[in-house]
Amino acid sequence: MDVSPHTVLVTVRDEYDAVDEPVGPKQIATAVGTTSKQIRPILESFCRNEFLVKTADGYRPTVTAREFLELDVELSDVAVVEIIED
């Protein structure tokens, strides 16, 4: 079963918030009804894009991910982002 990356991100946030601890790929896969094998590339992509942080115990959402999810847009939506350099 294909699962959307957006669903994975929301699930990581929700599962993390429920226990206040990083969540593993197996837990995420079970929550979205797929396999760990299908979830891992999505999780790694989110890590590269700074939406998730990988820890020894699993994954946790970043502030960036939380702010993105608060915008109430899907990952497939087009968004304009202003980048401000210090």
Image: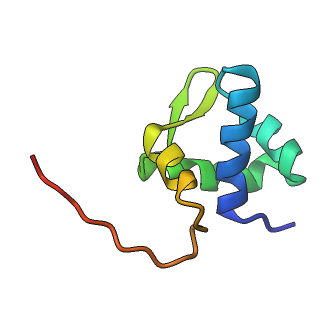
How was the colour assigned to the protein in this rendering?
A: rainbow
Task: Measuring from the top left, give residue 34's x and y in whole percent.
Answer: 86, 54
Task: Measuring from the top left, give residue 32's x and y in whole percent.
Answer: 84, 51
Quarter occupied by residue 84? bottom left
Give the quarter of the figure containing the N terminus. Answer: bottom right
Task: Measuring from the top left, give residue 35's x and y in whole percent.
Answer: 84, 51
Residue name at image x 72 percent, y 65 percent: 4
Residue name at image x 66 percent, y 20 percent: 21
Quarter occupied by residue 5? bottom right
Query: Would you say residue 5 is visible in this rendering?
Result: yes
Residue name at image x 48 percent, y 38 percent: 62
Q: Nearer the viewer, residue 64 or 70?
A: 70
Q: Is residue 8 left or right of residue 79?
A: right
Q: Is residue 43 left or right of residue 79?
A: right
Query: Would you say residue 45 is visible in this rendering?
Result: no
Q: Is residue 83 left or right of residue 63?
A: left
Q: Nearer the viewer, residue 79 or 4?
A: 79
Residue name at image x 70 percent, y 53 percent: 8
List the single residue furthest toward the bottom. 78
Judge whether 48 appears above or below 77 on screen: above
Q: Nearer the viewer, residue 42 or 7?
A: 7
List the single residue furthest toward the left. 86
Q: Nearer the viewer, residue 9 or 17?
A: 17
